[in-house]
Image (spheres, grey):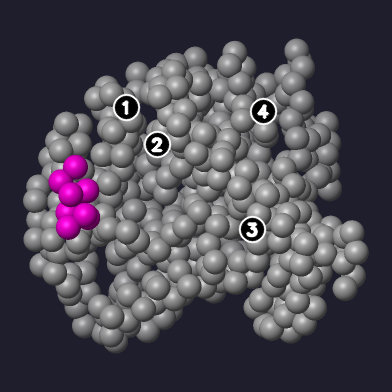
Amino acid sequence: METLWLDTADPAGVRRLVTVPDSLDERRYDHVVVGGGITGLTAALLLARAGRSVAVVEARHIGAGATGHTTGKLSLLQGTRLSSIRRKHSSRTLHDYVEANREGLGWLTHYCRERGVQIEERDAVTFATTDSGARRVADEHRACREAGLDVEEFDCPELPFPTSAAVRLVDQMQIDPMTVLRALAEDLRERGGELHEGVRVRGLRHSRHGHTVQTDSGSITAESVVIATGTPFLDRGGFFARLHAQRSYAAAFSVPGEIPRDMYLSADDPSVSLRTAPRPGAPDDTLLLVGGFGHDVGRTASEAEHVGDLMRWTGQHFPSARLVARWSAQDYRSIDEMPYVGSLLPGIDTVQVATGFAKWGLANGVAAALAMTGRLLGSRQAWARSFDTWRTSEIASAASAATTNLSVATHLVGGYLALLGSPDQSPSEGQGSVGHAGLTPRGICRVQGSTTTVTPICTHLYGVLRWNDAEQSWDCPLHGSRFAHTGEVLEGLATRPLPNTDT
């Protein structure tokens, strides 16, 4: 099923914004932005406002990545995020993170109101139902107070189950993210910027004359490049070794009677998110959105089980709930909990990247756009120092990095051992498996009655892919690249599709 937000966006309206020439070869711009999510489109608009020539290049369509699949929350209270950051960083870094999110939230709120985009005020609540969760809530309360946030203890009277602890921050926001992206795209075009969807970037070359962005529609030259693709697709900088990819799930339900109206996020494991949203085409009909139940990409026995857990949790606490839409999202967490925003490599400020938002990419994404364009236009926010892509604080996270990459090695070996077997030649509907035929790796799956065979080796760093039984995709457990059942790249570091082979 598609995300609720894509149902509310006008596809024809989006298509009218897209300029798709026969070739982009030899085109020149001041700035090229790779990625059509909240970070990329905000950065492009800021650069266009400064009078620069800008092109956005998006491999699929705007909102195809994390932004179009978020739960649409804008909050400075982010579950247990601040306490996680405080455990690894100084008080100054914690304040910088909050200030960045405050500025990102403020910019986006002002922009939505200026453009007539609906934005709803809600209180944000972090709650727990277990003793361990209650301890996390207490830690978050302390971190929020240290960061200057006026949080208060709360008893969650709206929730249909008892809580052991909760804190609340009033006057936060929730949005329809696709409506925001559409407004940004329209604004960009009005200011002379270009948006090219369906154009995948394959590589980047540097020279003294600028940067050459290599796409499947030709090579583009730019003075600077902003990479806003969830995770940087270039291996330069080694971000793939400094991040782990995570998936989480969301669903929208019609629930008769009263439902919780504030934005809730549990501190328990697995985490559960709640908010409301209008039904597409029926704004007076309010839906309940339930999210969470996440896991590392490609590293669970069954993704469908996580979806099942979400559905069972909802049925237990909201017995009359009826499913309207279901989707999933992918995001990336850094080894030291802080996002990376800044230069791809030390000393190359004309290639900017942003990643590691840990499922809080709306306010963080706008803040990242402000920081990156500030650097390109000759200014710098004081809080941006703590987001630098090359920061000394990572030394303290060496153990976390080692653990992350040991896990990668373990899955690499385990994947190749899985190839020693034989794949199921006649998989049941929605299922897939890997193995070998002679010396050739084979991945066989069956989707919508059709059996497809691919080479199940990730085109990024050659990890053996695993079948995702919830989304009928091939997922890489090493660094999170994902491919459609027929082999096309969906997201992640990979830029080349899987070879499609005969059964």
Residue at image coords 18%, 49%: 135
- Between marks 4 and 1 in the image, the one whose residue lies nearer the viewer: 1
Which residue is tagged 3?
A: 475
Q: Nearer the viewer, residue 396 or 247?
A: 396
Q: Nearer the viewer, residue 254 or 139?
A: 139
Q: Amino acid at mark 3?
A: Asp
Q: Tell me where residue 233 appears, x and y as whole percent.
A: 66, 39
- Quote the CA–CA distance across marks 3 and 2: 24 Å
Q: Which mark is residue 376?
A: none
Which image quarter is the C terminus in?
bottom right
Q: Mark 1 or mark 2, which has the lower sequence index?
A: 1
Q: Mark 4 or mark 1, which has the lower sequence index?
A: 1
- Is 136 magenta? The answer is yes
Please indicate, yes or no, whether residue 40 appears anywhere in the rendered image. no
Q: Mark 4 or mark 2, which has the lower sequence index?
A: 4
Q: Are marks 4 and 2 in contact (CB under 8 Å)?
A: no
- Quote the CA–CA distance across marks 4 and 1: 26 Å
- Between marks 3 and 4 in the image, the one whose residue lies nearer the viewer: 3
Which residue is tagged 1?
A: 89
Q: Are marks 1 and 2 in contact (CB under 8 Å)?
A: yes
Looking at the image, is 417 positioned above or below residue 57? below
The span shown in magenta is 131-139
Q: Tell me where residue 22 appears, x and y as whole percent.
A: 84, 48
Residue at image coords 21%, 54%: 132
Residue at image coords 22%, 55%: 133
Which residue is tagged 2?
A: 337
Which residue is tagged 4?
A: 236
Q: Mark 3 or mark 2, which has the lower sequence index?
A: 2
Q: Amino acid at mark 2?
A: Glu
Figure quadrant of residue 213: top right
- Quote the CA–CA distance across marks 3 and 4: 22 Å
